[in-house]
């Protein structure tokens, strides 16, 4: 059984029962996952070619990242308007569920000295954000080609009533929160 069918057939009805929700459309659901990688320091150090980072993010997510550019110049950071400062990927549908399954079952247990993710990273809308220090923990990234490890920010956006419902959904999916 795939992760998506397990999610829709088993986990969502279980959550609906435990939260005592009568209308199935009010059950908390994952809407999208957004992955960001900042490349401002990489570009500011003089490297104009960030195609290796772009390729790494494409291998991790399975789709081409969108490059984000600075909107204004900041002289203290040696930042000029129009310089590339980051990359982002928005995952929906099957790719989103595949990435989430890979993250929960393979990636996070691979992290050295991993004790769980802090559960305090929910915003008021119930969305959950956390960071990964090195993008090299993903098995798709070839270790020999990595010039400098970069961090990733992963945001899971929910359609939900609040952060308690979002946390309950992530716990039932097997997300490793700290105790």
Image (spheres, rainbow, N blue to C red):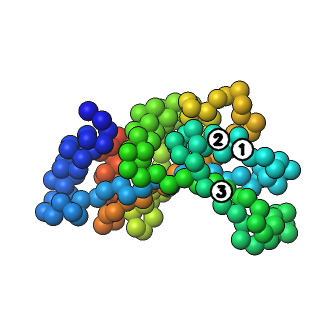
Where is mark 3, residue-wise?
A: 67
Q: Residue at x 45, y 42 (%)?
A: 99
Identify the residue at the far left of this view. Answer: 22
Kind of element beneath mark 3: strand
Kind of element beneath mark 1: helix
Quarter of the picture holding the N terminus? top left
Choose between 134 and 142: the one closer to the eye. 142
Callout 1 touching callout 3 (CB < 8 Å): no
Q: Residue at x 42, y 56 (%)?
A: 32
* Left or right: 52 as drawn, with respect to 175: right
Residue 119 screen position, x and y as percent: 44, 52
C-alpha span from label 1 to label 3: 11 Å
Callout 2 touching callout 1 (CB < 8 Å): yes
Quarter of the picture holding the C terminus? top left
Q: Residue at x 56, y 32 (%)?
A: 140
Where is mark 2, residue-wise?
A: 55
Question: Does 152 sit above or below residue 127?
Answer: above
- Say whether disc 3 or disc 2 marks the residue closer to the N-terminus: 2
C-alpha span from label 3 to label 2: 12 Å
């Amino acid at each position: 059984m795939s992760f998506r069918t397990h999610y829709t057939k088993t986990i969502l009805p279980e959550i609906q029962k435990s939260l005592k929700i009568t209308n199935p459309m009010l059950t908390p659901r994952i809407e999208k996952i957004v992955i960001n990688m900042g490349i401002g320091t990489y570009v500011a150090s003089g490297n104009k070619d960030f195609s290796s980072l772009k390729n790494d993010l494409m291998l991790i997510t399975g789709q081409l990242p969108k490059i984000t550019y600075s909107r204004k110049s900041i002289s203290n950071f040696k930042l000029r308007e129009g310089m590339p400062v980051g990359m982002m990927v928005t995952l929906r549908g099957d790719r989103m569920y595949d990435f989430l399954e890979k993250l929960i079952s393979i990636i996070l247990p691979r992290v050295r000295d991993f004790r769980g993710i802090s559960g305090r990273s929910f915003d008021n809308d119930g969305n959950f954000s956390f960071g990964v220090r090195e993008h090299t923990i993903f098995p798709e990234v070839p270790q020999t080609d990595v010039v400098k490890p970069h961090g990733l920010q992963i945001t899971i956006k929910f359609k939900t009533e609040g952060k308690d419902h979002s946390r309950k959904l992530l716990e039932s999916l097997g997300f490793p929160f700290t105790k």
